Amino acid sequence: MGEWKRHRILMVSDFFYPNFGGVENHIYYLSQCLLKLGHKVVVMTHAYNNRSGVRYMTGGLKVYYVPWKPFLMQNTFPTFYGTLPIVRTILIREKISLVHGHQAFSTLCHEALMHARTMGYKVVFTDHSLYGFADAGSIHMNKVLQFTLAEVSQAICVSHTSKENTVLRSGLPPEKVFVIPNAVDTAMFKPAPERLSSHEIVIVVISRLVYRKGADLLVEVIPEVCRLYPNVRFIVGGDGPKRVRLEEMREKHSLQDRVEMLGAVQHSQVRSVLITGHIFLNSSLTEAFCIAILEAASCGLLTVSTRVGGVPEVLPDDMIVLAKPDPSDMVQAIKKAISILPKIDPQEMHNRMKELYNWHDVAKRTEIVYDRALKCSNQNLLQRLSRYLSCGAWAGKLFCLVMIIDFLLWHLLQLWKPAEDIEEVPDFVLSHDQDEGMNQSLR
């Protein structure tokens, strides 16, 4: 196994608390478990409303909320070089050895990885989503990803489907990409103390009500299921532009007493919503992994989901019923789920989830990726530029120009403010009581 090495990791993404989502949860839980393994972890994200500056979270997790405001979908405005001074300062102050960026949508992630490579740091990238190849947005995003991953030390994807997608989009060698799935905090997501009555079947939907999450499918599926099963009731949690369509469907079919619209649900309240139901319905049109399915299964709910992306890899066949992203096929899947519902034991399902998905296991596997990244050889500027030239006839030359300017600006910063003038901060060390408290919270 070799000698254990303590890593000093900077996690970078536009998506972090107080915002809630799969990427935010992944960064938080992974960071907590890496801290538990003895590594130093610092998170860098943009400011959220009045939350700016340095904050400390559970377990001594240090978060830099840099004073950049989001301008679109929680993403900061792309500046290319505007973040270089603050990224350099954080890397030196915290004595970082490796930078880990999350999510291809994140502008801050792309810029931080670019600057880190210019300064000679090893970088790791985790892709959390699937993207297409045909529409204008995907073509643009894939070219940006190709630029960012041209020099990445190692990459991580959350499913085998996601790995195939990332390799095809970025041209990254498959041997550089690892598959490490998400996990679930089974201590937080427990089944209801008492088994629910089977006289009324409750189907729970918790999702952003947008096109990508299949909200339009729900508009057609819910009325048909209600027509076939008078004892079925729906609880829909989440908000988004498609909520209006669901409200109209409820009015049109007079289902006000059978379809409950909760609106946006805080993550701390998700479990209390899930344990009121028997079946969890996921109607996503594209999904790399879907943590929501894990949370539902951990609470003992049988899952019905569209067969898209990495979803078939998430749960064993006896814990999920898959369907094509088609209304009639989804109705058939719900009928099948209702028929096998008496065989489902929520507590047994929860116990299986504890064995299948564990954040400590994710952290240990990520630790191996970090070890491999740090063993990658260092390259000079000319060797690095040759990689960017291979990204395309015109794009390659543009990428080289961007990197040359970044390299020159970095050297100017070194002259203007040498690294010796930047004060290094002492490491935060947990007391024994704090360490035990964090350990209990992660079990």
Image (tube, helix red, strand yellow):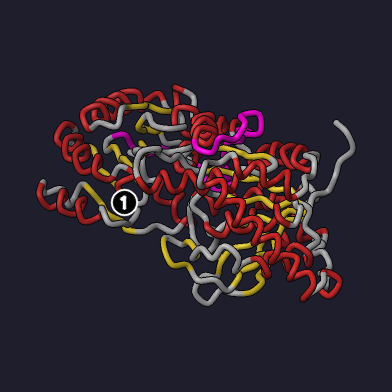
**Considering depth in this image, is 210 or 424 the residue closer to the camera?**
424
Up-down: is 340 above or below 354? Answer: above
Residue 425, by quadrant, is bottom right
The answer to whether any part of residue 293 appears in the image is no
Residue 411, by quadrant, is bottom right
Up-down: is 398 above or below 316? Answer: below
**Considering depth in this image, is 375 or 370 the residue closer to the camera?**
375
Q: Could you tell whether 168 is left or right of 132 in the image?
A: right
Q: Is residue 181 magenta?
A: yes
Q: Residue at x 64, y 55 (%)?
A: 403
Dot 1 crowding, Cα within 10 Å, few <14, some 14–19, many 20+: many
User: Dominant secondary structure of the magenta stretch?
Assistant: loop
Question: Start and end of the magenta stretch?
Answer: 169-198
Q: Residue at x 19, y 52 (%)?
A: 245
The quarter in which the N terminus is drawn is: top right
Q: Residue at x 44, y 59 (%)?
A: 266
Q: Is residue 191 magenta?
A: yes
Up-down: is 50 above or below 31? Answer: below
Q: Residue tagged by mark 1?
A: 209
Q: Could you tell whether 54 is left or right of 335 in the image?
A: right
Residue 372 location (% of width, % of height): 76, 37
What SS does tag 1 mark?
loop
